[in-house]
Image (cartoon, helix red, strand yellow):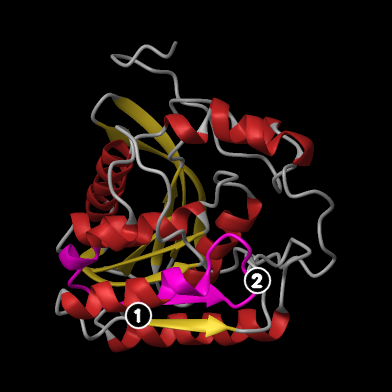
Amino acid sequence: MTDRRAFIATGLVSGFTLAAGPINAAAILTDTAGLEAGEVSIKVGDGRVPAYRARPKDKTHAPVILVVQEIFGVHEFIKDVCRRLAHQGYYAVAPALYARYGDPGKYDMNHIEQLISDVVSKVPDNEVMGDLDAAVAFAKGEGADTAKLGITGFCWGGRIVWLYAAHNPRVKAGVAWYGPLRGKTDALHPKTAIELAPQIHAPILGNYAGKDMGIPIVDVAEMREALAKGGNTKSRIDIFEASQHGFFADYRGSYNEADAKTGWAHALAWFAENGVK
């Protein structure tokens, strides 16, 4: 059992995750020209966690975007998203939110259920919120402009976008990519995104897939209704009808290039239009 008083954090995943299987030839690798990018260490309540941070070298007080990992951890795809955002002028940081519980990089595509039971299921929502708060504080300490705070996340991290927007009223805008909106709750994960919708006041853009086998359209409809009932009329959820779950993940077979490019353009415009620029 991990010593909660002084845990030893696991590092970032090297390369792409093994759990998604063979790497798609379309995988995007963004360079670091003009950027300061790499692993950093963030102080949290019970120790330190590693994170990947990318920022422009020649820009001070850059707006901040938290990048929340997929179920597979902070691997090359998540790092690349940070670099893409940094090239757009953002300070992007992705903390390793499983750091206390194990290394997601050691699980291959035949052991995803084991990854979930060994690691993912043990990560408490409230701890994730605290680690993201710590990442914001770290960014501020490096001179970033945390008054312009955004968040984006994918799959597991897409759910966290909704939760963090409910948790932190300083979030200006968020983009959630195919994050679960409902599901089983327990002591570590007490509320679904739909249940927390009344507490979300920031404008959130949801990019969801019409052929997602795990997130039915009825959930999207219920989330839209819950947001509207809570008075959040600025949020929007788009459905990409031809796509599957994971359509933005260019390293995976689920990648849909056209929808990924459209979703990315919408995401950048969303942040700019809502005070994160």
Q: Three-letter amino acid code at disc 1?
A: Phe
Q: Where does label 2 land, which residue? A: 247
Compared to 259, does 133 lie above or below? above
Whether residue 244 is visible to the viewer of this picture, yes or no, is yes
The extreme front residue here reads 218
Picture quadrant of residue 91: bottom left
Mark 1 neighbour class, 10 Å CA radius: few under 14, some 14 to 19, many 20 or more: many
Compared to 59, does 96 lie above or below? above
Which residue is depicted at the point 37% across and 84% down? 270
Q: Tell me: 234 left or right of 112.
A: left
Q: Position of residue 17 (x, y in %)?
A: 70, 45
Whether residue 68 is visible to the viewer of this picture, yes or no, is no
Q: Where does label 1 land, which residue? A: 271
Q: Tell me: 161 left or right of 266.
A: left
Contact, CB < 8 Å: mark 1 with mark 2? no
Q: Which residues are magenta?
A: 197-220
Compared to 68, does 222 lie above or below? below
Q: Earlier in the sequence, mark 1 or mark 2?
A: 2
Q: Tell me: 68 left or right of 199.
A: right
Picture quadrant of residue 163: bottom left
Which residue is depicted at the point 69% across and 30% down? 106
Q: Position of residue 182 (x, y in %)?
A: 40, 57
Mark 2 neighbour class, 10 Å CA radius: few under 14, some 14 to 19, many 20 or more: many
Q: Position of residue 42 (x, y in %)?
A: 34, 38
